[in-house]
Amino acid sequence: AQKVTQAQTEISVVEKEDVTLDCVYETRDTTYYLFWYKQPPSGELVFLIRRNSFDEQNEISGRYSWNFQKSTSSFNFTITASQVVDSAVYFCALSEGKAAGNKLTFGGGTRVLVKP
Amino acid sequence: DAGVIQSPRHEVTEMGQEVTLRCKPISGHNSLFWYRQTMMRGLELLIYFNNNVPIDDSGMPEDRFSAKMPNASFSTLKIQPSEPRDSAVYFCASSFRQGRVELGAFFGQGTRLTVV
């Protein structure tokens, strides 16, 4: 069965600090997909990134970067130079590669509070 | 595209009443998911459809919950009779997967259900 663990329940930083969110996953599939979502106080779930298990290249998008390590089953997310608008709950999610199933399993989320 | 559209955004109903939540997925997506979010349990997958066919409904809490997808552009989640413990935010999401192409799930804005 697939499982996603976000050990950090809440992180508080001061604006302009970097913050790294940990995500560890479990799956028996060799093909799978990893995602990060942001849930701001307004409540919607915003898709941030998708990563395939067969592509370990790390990615940077503006102040966001992601570090995918298959060897440790981790897909960590870093916000560089955090801003107040980054305050949100961030979810890591996993989807296995079965042909007939692509349901997302979510971690418990990490609440990030960026103080001015 | 307008994204995933859910209605209503908010619903307040009395215990015992029937509640119907509606979802219009993104055009061209072949999977649809219903999730429920509560403080206690986080994001739970209730049911998902692939090409309009229910694939996994193991997350549906009990027989009071039912979901349908009569065509590729519409789905409903019905609770009958509703109970106070059903109070939660219900999200609909859609995604596209074909072979190794996985676009990731895009979520609607959610329906906040309150059963009094």
Image (tube, coloured by chain):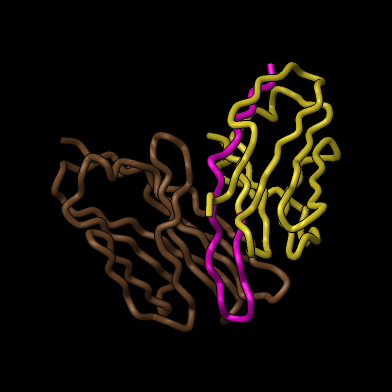
Q: Is residue B103 above or below residue B41?
A: below
The picture quadrant where one finds residue B36 is top right
Residue B2: x, y in percent? 53, 49
In the depicted structure, whether residue A25 falls above or below residue B13 = below
The image shows residue B84 at horizontal and vertical percentages of: 70, 22
From the viewer's side, name the closer residue of B61 and B105.
B105
Give the chain letter for brown: A
Determine the residue located farthest toward the front in the rendered image.
B1
Residue at image position (61%, 67%) is B96
Figure colour of chain B: yellow
In the image, taking residue B104 as reference, residue A82 lies left or right, namely left
Q: Quadrant of the C terminus of chain B?
A: top right
B68 relative to A43, above or below: below
Q: Is residue A16 left or right of residue B56?
A: left
User: Looking at the picture, how far across and down is residue B92, in whole percent?
Assistant: 63, 47
B44 is within the stretch colored magenta: no
Depicted B48 relative to depicted B84: above or below: below
* Region of the chain picked out in magenta, as a range: B94-116
Q: Residue at x 22, y 59 (%)?
A: A63
